[in-house]
Each structure stands twice: as C-alpha cells, then as structure tokens.
Image (spheres, rainbow, N blue to C red):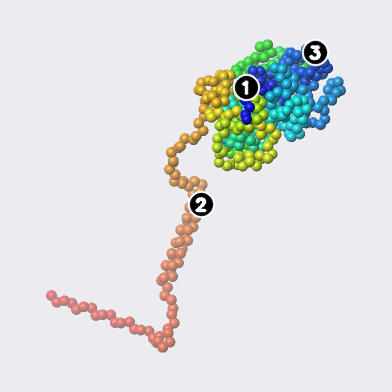
Amino acid sequence: MVEEARPALGLSIGATNLAAVTTDHAITRKPVLTLYRQRPPEVGVPSENPRLDEPGLVITDFVDRVGDPIGIVAADGSVHRSEALVVDGLRALASAVGGRTLSESVAVTYPAHWGLKAIDALGTAVSQVAQRSRPLALIPDAAATLFAARANPGIPARGVVAVCDFGGSGTSITLVDAAAEYQPLAATVRYPDFSGDLIDQALLRAVLANTSSGDTVDPSGTSAIDSLSRLRAGCRSAKEQLSSSTVTTLSDGDVRLTRNELDDAIRDSLNGFMAVLEETIRGNGIRGPDLVAVVSVGGGANIPAVTTMLSGTLRVPVVTTPRPQLAAAIGAALRASRGPGDSTATALTPAASPPGPAHEQAREQAAAEPPGWAEARLSEPVLRSMPALAWSETADDSRVPPVHAGQDPKPGGGSGYTSARPALNFQRTARPRREPKPAVMPWYRLPAVLAIGTAVAVLLVGMAVAMGFGSDDTPATTPAPGVSSAPVSPAPPAPPPAPVQP
C-alpha cells in the first residue's frame, strides 16, 4: 500500500555549498565545520550562521576528500575522516532548518561524478549516525535534479536529456534516456574549468585591470589581502546581480560592472565547456534529433549567457527550475516525501519509443547503473507540456509562481519558466528547384582542345589521301595456265554517219 506524502527534508552535498530544503524553509551553508567541546558542531561561516558565537576548531576542504583513507589533520593535531565531517555538517544543517534529525524522512544527494569508493564511504558514515529502521536514501544530485525539473516546470518524456549542473567548483554533464525512466547513458563527465569560483576570479581580474591600483586595492599595504577578499566577495555578488540586471556596482559604488563585461570574462571558459559537451554527446552515439532538451541547474544556470549559448548551439529547449541552485535539494525533498512502500511508476510515462543507439546503450548499461538512480524512478509525474527556454535577458520573469505537478501552464505567467529569447523555427524553407546551366569550358582549356582537334583533323586528312592514291594503281596479275598472253587488238572505230542530203 502506498503511503501518503509526508513532511520531508532534502539535503544536498556540494564542494562549495551544502543545502537543505523543506516544505517551508531553504538554507545554504558553506562546507565549513566548527567543532566545539560542549555542544554539537556548527556548519557555515559567521555571515551565514548566527550560532557561530564562540571559538572552536574550524575544518574546511573535506567534501572533495570523501572516501580518502587518509584523514584530515586539524589545527590542534587531531585527525578526522572526511565522510564523518560531511555527516556532521548534514546533521547541523538539518537542525538549522527546523530542528530536524537524520532519523526522519530525509534524502541526501551526493555529486554525480563521485566514484563508488566515495559513495560507499558516505553511506557507511550516514548509516552509523542515522538510527533508522531503513537505510537513508542516497541519490546522485543529477537524479534529484530530474525530480525537481519533472515536477516543475516539466521535461520531455522521451528522447535524450542532458543535465548540466553549473556548480561552484566545476560543471557536470549527465546524459539520461527519458524513455527508459531517465536512466543514465554513461558516467557523469566533470569539467572543472567552468565554475562559479573561476567566474569570480575572472571578474576580479577584469575589475583590477580596469581600475588603478590606488582606487580600490593597495598591493603594498598591509590590508591588501583583506581588500582583495572583500573585492572578490563583491565580484561574486555582482555576478549574481548581473543574472537579473544589466549593470551593477561594487566597492561602495566606485566600480561599475555590466553584463557585457561578465560575458567577456567567461567567454573562453564557456566555449571550452560547450566543446566538451558536444564531444560528450557525439562520443555516446547521440545524433542531433535524439537530444530533446537540456536541464540547466546550479548557480551558473542563472547567467543568461549560459542559457543563450546552450540553446543557440544545441538548438533544443533549455529547462531550469525556479531556483536552480537548490534543484538537487528540492528533488531530494520530493523523493523523501514518498513513503518506504511507494513503488509506483511515473504517472504519465509514455510508450517506449522505437529502439535506437541511445536506447540500446541504456539497456546495456542497466547492470552498471550508479547507486541511487533506481531511487530516481519514484518521482513526481511528468508534465505533458514542453517548457520554453528558461531565462530572459530583458526581464527577470523567472520568479513567477511555479506550476505544480498536474497543473497546466498558462501563457504569460505562472509557469515557472520564461523564454530566453523568441522561439526559433529550425525547419528549412523549401526553395524552388533551379534548372541546370550548360557547362561552360574554361578559357585556359581552349589551347589544349584546339591542339588535339588539329592533330585529329590532320590524321583524318592523311588517311583519306592515302586511300585515294591506293585506288588509282592497277595491280599486276599473273595469267592463269592455258590462257594466252598475246595482246588483244582493240576493235576498229565505227564509221562516221553518212551526211543527209537536202
């Protein structure tokens, strides 16, 4: 029997952010853990967490080391396992979002590019902390993203969908087959050269290049490091503001940044990512018509140039959620809201499409499916409608009220997505058939043709002359035996006629 939906908590693990989502709260924290002697650990930095009101042991850079057998050495000389630190951070995050614990209805997402060693280590650490009657749901963030995108605004139910997660430390590419219940076609590809951190650095370089050294930062001063840190934080804030506006300022209004400057700063790295994405699509045997949509999530999905590049290059709809930076945590909450006995399939799953290269590869890789993808098949219904492109460069309409599963989107608002640009018609217009033109011989070939023609004509004339002379000669013959060879006298001429008398 299927249990009713219940309040749930979705947690997502990222190298630059940890997120928690419930039905009425959503928070993010930096993966910075502070350990105390008399109370549980706290997660985040002081600007995010008001409970960091006393000194403690601060540990960072532990997310990317999950599964590493070598522990992290803290400032006091103590050694800590990375996966244990991640679980402590998740517990602190669950507590901060409303006093939750990991023993309730919780689903946790991990980066889809993680290997089996890291996934197993995380699962073991979670099971040792969460006292539950059943294992905690651990699913890849790409699978959780599909939960969120299928519920709002909706994605195609057949064909190949590319999930692009633009995170703080890199971008991940996951190809899934929608007709096969969104099963991954291959391992997730990680591209570290296009990330939120690198975009911040590119903006910082652009600001420093356009600003004299004495205006904002004094490299020779003792406060240069603090000034650069504040300026980089300002560039990060400016990047977020330029996602919805065309101009912003930083450093107390002294420095002006435009969206065009942001686009120039990320152009090379974005082109590099697009090259990797196209190569990933081709390398998996996916032809142009097989790719039906791109799901763009993560903080970088808010940048209009990213959506424009994806839609203009791949010529498919680019879909995102209303809050793409929380897509994984929202999808995890949707999964956690299902009871343990809920094994229903997607409500609007269509009939399987004809077999093709993508579907054949999906079936071949079913046995090697990464952990957690089976959980992703128990999701919210797929909307029947195809969404438009996700972001607009002229107006920030992405914050309109979302459409819930089963609700028909209406033009002009309330759909949870907007159009990044007017709809494009990719069908070619039929052109009138042109009559073939007679071939014209190039001028440089005329001397050769004339020489050959002259030679042929001379040869023909010579043959004709030779035949003519041969016909005038009388061949000598030898008389046959018994035949006289005496000359024969010619007959006398006939007499002239008699004159006629008058």
Residue corresponding to mark 2: 448
First reached walking from the N terminus: tag 3 or tag 1: 3
Relative to 282, say whether 489 is above or below: below
* Callouts 1 and 2 close, C-beta under 8 Å: no
Q: Residue at x 50, y 34 (%)?
A: 427
Question: Label 1 belongs to which residue?
Answer: 323
Q: Residue at the left extreme? A: 502
Q: Earlier in the sequence, mark 2 or mark 3?
A: 3
Examine the rendered structure and indicate whether residue 363 appears above or below residue 298: below
Which label's residue is closer to the chain start, 1 or 2? 1
Q: In which quarter of the view is residue 178 placed? A: top right
Q: Is residue 326 visible?
A: no
Q: CA distance from mark 2 to mark 3?
A: 97 Å
C-alpha span from label 3 to label 1? 33 Å
**Which residue shows up at 49% across the image and 46% down it?**
442
Element class at badge 1? loop
Q: Which residue is mark 3?
A: 54
